[in-house]
Amino acid sequence: MAWTVVPNLDEARDQLNRRFPKRDTRSDGSIGDTSHQSAPSSHNPDRTGRPEYGDGDHLDEVRARDFDADLHDPGGVTMEQVVQLWVKLARSGALWWVRYIIYQGRIWHRRHNFATHAYTGSNRHMTHCHVNSDFTQAADTVRGTNWQLDQLAGTAPVRPAPGPAVPYPLPAGHYFGPRSGGDRSVSGYYRRRFNGKSDREWLAMWTKQLTRRGWPAGKGRRYLRRSGADGLYGPEYRELIKAFQADQGLTRDGLLGRKTWDAAYNNPIR
């Protein structure tokens, strides 16, 4: 089946990528997965054509895009600012083809002149912004959209000072890692205790130090999306640790040893 996203939403994606080159894209989406295909959704291609077009020969079109909320802008611009800008432009008519926008349990719909309302759908769009284009031929074919992201200016976030150091809690040669890694790999799954706390508590404490200093590591954020800082080492913790190691110029092995632990408490975070 051939399908395409309407051009104005592809232009929004491209302009976001240029304005925020380090943004996360894991929650980006266009064509729906199987859960969308079981019910009407703008993420599904229009397979039948629409009466106002006069025929059904046009490409199957997806009229919605999701944009990940984590922009990673060094100037501090947030997705909330992007959403409010687009709502303002839609209300003014500058983005006349926008039908509605959903973000973090709120919806701005044309039928209500883009006033804020609670969104009651099953997916509250907490980690991404959903933009829906209109169901008209004019909206499907409009090109050259300026989503006006150059209007946005943030204030660079102030990184908290490292704070009092917490000594590395594991014995020499041990590290926080996968449960398949043997005795020296402390995963949080086996209720081991070190220096008065469980392995899970120690790993969660290190993660809390990162979030205190501005890293998007909590539940629903860039790294620990599903379970949050539960202290159970898995793929999400591995990616978080690797990203922090890259920030600190350490070996990117995804294992939390003494050097990586100490960096969170002693080193500047970029």
Image (spheres, helix red, strand yellow):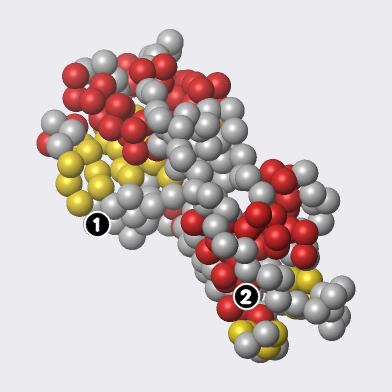
Q: Quick check: 154 left or right of 210?
A: left
Residue type, mark 1 in image = Thr
Residue plotted at (29% across, 52% down): 105
Q: Percent from the top left, x then y, of residue 212? A: 49, 56
**Which label sits in the foreground, 2 or 1?**
2
Q: Camera-side residue: 118 or 45? A: 118
Q: Camera-side residue: 16 or 32? A: 16
Q: Percent from the top left, x then y, of residue 176? A: 74, 71
Q: Percent from the top left, x then y, of residue 196? A: 63, 88
In the figure, 248 relative to 52: above or below?
below
Residue bearing mark 2: 202
Residue plotted at (21% across, 18% down): 93
Q: Quadrant of residue 1?
A: top right
Residue 120 badge: 1
| Among numbered discs 2 and 1, the one appearing first in the sequence | 1
Neighbour class for label 2 at 10 Å: few (<14), some, many (≥20)? Answer: many
Q: Percent from the top left, x then y, of residue 177? A: 76, 70
Q: Quick check: 147 left or right of 176?
A: left
Q: Quadrant of residue 195?
A: bottom right
Helix, strand or loop at disc 1?
Answer: loop
Q: Quadrant of residue 112?
A: top left
In the figure, 202 relative to 248: above or below?
below
* Mark 2 and mark 1: Cα distance apart in space: 37 Å
Q: Camera-side residue: 146 or 144? A: 146
